[in-house]
């Protein structure tokens, strides 16, 4: 007898039963941009539907996430004043630290993840200490450890170093353990590529480099084997979760991560991937909801256990209504 694939496609109920990959609300992590001030809710022009918000606006945001069933956020902070010391990033009363404290006190069941990078706090927009015209790897580690420790003191569940400095995971793990934060997890931006898809994020976080670029410390887009090496190194240094960023153009890397390593794999569905769908939908060229869900499902199918996405709320609404 011949196999007929259409037997498993002939009705919605059969198609549901035979799905190989299922996207759930539990897979979603929602990024939030917090900034100093009061009564602030600024829409990000290049990311329709996304906002920079002040701490007093967090209550409404968190209540919506809880209602939708989203269980994790990834916090990014904007600096009121930038300096070479990145003093606001290390300040235990900084905007991110205050946001962590607020969420953990009022929404204790939400997992709070924090981005650990100083690009939004430096005048030059790079991810570490500048030595001449170069980013000095080892001098930058102290800043990253200080920032991660401050987030841990505020109550962060997981810190996520994204600066792509060599040995950043090891330095942060050692620093956290020395301060008795051995239970604070690390989600490493292990395979973070030098990508053209980050433009809207840099607008959101005011973190564009003021000279040069980040090619010397972010990964070359042509490289696949290097990603395996980077992910393996981060795991050996103490990473609990490894991340691939961006997601859509690097599904092969997500698949490699899932097949080669025994830790959770996160995919970051980045700002450019979000804004492309928003722009095309605005022009009437694509169905926004269908494209969103298909794209997120592709990441899940490739092997992502967690998906960081600006579409988290819209996707949760769609999943909850199915």
Image (cartoon, rainbow, N blue to C red):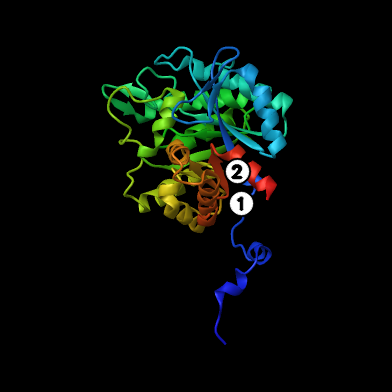
Q: Label 1 belongs to which residue?
A: 23
Query: Closest to the observer: 215 or 55?
Result: 55
| Quadrant for the N terminus in the image | bottom right
In this rendering, is residue 304 above or below 94? Answer: below
Q: Which of marks 2 and 1 is in front?
A: 2
Residue drawn 63% across the image and 20% down it: 57
Q: Position of residue 239 (x, y in %)?
A: 53, 42
Mark 1 element type: loop
Q: Can residue 165 be seen in this view?
A: no
Task: Looking at the image, tell me whether mark 2 or mark 1 is earlier in sequence order.
Answer: 1
What is the crowding at mark 2: few (fewer than 14 residues within 10 Å), some, or many (at least 20)?
Answer: many
Q: In which quadrant of the rendered view does residue 38 lie?
A: top right
Query: Closest to the observer: 98 or 146?
Result: 98
CB under 8 Å between callouts 2 and 1?
yes
* Residue sticking out furthest to the front: 284
Q: Where is residue 313 in the image (x, y as percent from the top left)?
A: 61, 37
């Amino acid at each position: 007898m011949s196999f007929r694939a259409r037997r498993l496609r002939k009705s919605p109920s059969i198609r549901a039963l035979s799905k190989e990959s299922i996207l759930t609300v539990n897979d979603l992590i929602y990024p939030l941009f917090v900034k100093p001030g009061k009564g602030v809710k600024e829409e990000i022009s290049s990311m329709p539907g996304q906002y920079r918000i002040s701490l007093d606006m967090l209550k409404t945001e968190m209540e919506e996430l809880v209602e939708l069933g989203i269980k994790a956020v990834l916090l990014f902070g904007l600096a009121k004043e930038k300096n070479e010391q990145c003093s606001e990033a290390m300040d235990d009363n900084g905007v991110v630290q205050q946001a962590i404290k607020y969420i953990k006190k009022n929404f204790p069941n939400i997992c709070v993840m924090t981005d650990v990078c100083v690009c939004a706090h430096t005048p030059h927009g790079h991810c570490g200490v500048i030595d001449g015209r170069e980013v000095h790897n080892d001098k930058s580690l102290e800043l990253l450890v200080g920032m991660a420790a401050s987030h841990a003191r505020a109550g962060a569940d997981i810190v996520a170093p994204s600066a792509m400095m060599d040995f950043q995971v090891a330095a942060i793990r050692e620093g956290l353990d020395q301060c008795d934060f051995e239970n604070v997890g690390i989600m490493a931006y292990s395979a973070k590529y030098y990508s053209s898809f980050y433009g809207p994020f840099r607008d959101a976080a005011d973190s564009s480099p003021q000279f040069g670029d980040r090619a010397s410390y972010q990964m070359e887009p042509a490289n696949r084997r290097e990603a395996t090496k980077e992910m393996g190194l981060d795991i050996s240094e103490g990473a609990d979760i490894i991340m691939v960023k961006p997601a859509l153009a690097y599904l092969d890397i997500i698949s490699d991560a899932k097949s080669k390593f025994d830790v959770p794999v996160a995919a970051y569905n980045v700002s450019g991937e979000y804004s492309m769908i928003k722009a095309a939908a605005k022009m009437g060229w694509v169905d926004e909801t269908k494209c969103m869900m298909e794209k997120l499902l592709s990441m899940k199918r490739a092997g992502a256990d967690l998906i960081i996405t600006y579409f988290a709320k819209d996707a949760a609404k769609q999943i909850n209504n199915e």
